[in-house]
Amino acid sequence: MTGFWVLLRKEVLEQRRTWKFVAMAAVLSLSAVLGPTIFAIVTRVRDEPHGVVQAVEALEGIAVTMTFLGTFIAIVISMGVLATERATGTAAMTLSKPVTRSAFVAAKALGLLASIAIGVIVASTVGYVLILILFADGGLGRFATGMVINGAALLFIAFIAMFWSAMFTRQLLAGGLAFATFIVLNTLRAVPDTDRYLPIVAPDWAASIIRAETSNEWPAFGILCGCLVLLPLAAWVIFRRKEL
């Protein structure tokens, strides 16, 4: 892991320069604002109460919308993290210095983690404050727990894109394969008794936690956490065998 901290600082500066932090936070915050605002307008038109029940529904809506939009933005910011570096020759120049490929891949992975974590934290804060203003307290603890799970699910998608990015030099191909993987994982949910073991069900578990419903998806979440370790390792194994 020689040169890891230098590469990590470089990655953070690059993400700031390319506005990846801002893009992730802006897209997720927009999804956190639009849903509750539309829901509040609809409830006012129907002259429905604005209480705890409506607040919980709005919080669940935030989680669902953030997952939907966040999946696409996670793929977009991740599909070129290694592919573009190889295609432009930047990886070759960087690795000609006293740094290792493991440090290179680890810095990219932590950069993605930082982008997604900042985006989820900012959007969750904005969304919850808006819910307090428009409705009521829908349960901060449950919402925070659900957002942590959602953040892990988005990072899982980002790491899938990074895995494919390590394999190819075309970022659009890596992004397409990441999206195809996402579709396949969702299709597998149609197989009976698989939901408890598929990492892709984490957002549904997050929504059930926000609704204060009992649901045991710990096996799927455990596998998800394992994938968050294995996918960057797999990307490194592939990347270290590639010609720069």
Image: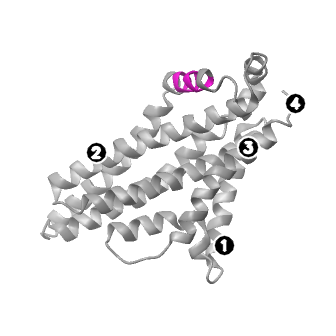
First reached walking from the N terminus: tag 2 or tag 4: 2
Q: Which residue is mark 3?
A: 235
Give the class, few, some or many, for how many residues have Cα within 10 Å of label 1's Cα (few <14, many ≥20): few
The disc labelled 4 sits on which kind of residue? Glu
Give the class, few, some or many, for how many residues have Cα within 10 Å of label 4's Cα (few <14, many ≥20): few
Question: Residue at 72% of width from left, 19% of height from top?
Answer: 94
First reached walking from the N terminus: tag 1 or tag 4: 1
Q: Contact, CB < 8 Å: mark 3 with mark 1? A: no
Cα distance between the residues tagged 3 and 4: 14 Å
Question: In the rendered view, does 60 fall on the left or right side of 12?
Answer: left
Q: Which residue is mark 2?
A: 126
Question: In the rendered view, does 156 fall on the left or right side of 238?
Answer: left
The dot on residue 17 is none
Residue range highlighted in magenta: 7-14
Cα distance between the residues tagged 2 and 4: 44 Å
Q: Is residue 214 magenta?
A: no
Give the class, few, some or many, for how many residues have Cα within 10 Å of label 2's Cα (few <14, many ≥20): some
Q: At numbered mark 1, what does the secondary structure look like: helix, strand or loop?
A: helix
Q: Nearer the viewer, mark 3 or mark 2?
A: 3
Q: Which residue is mark 1?
A: 188
Q: Is residue 99 above or below residue 226?
A: above
Q: Nearer the viewer, mark 1 or mark 4?
A: 4
Location of residue 143 in the rendering, given as x and y in whole percent from the top left corner: 32, 59
Q: Which residue is mark 4?
A: 243
Question: In the rendered view, does 9 fall on the left or right side of 125?
Answer: right
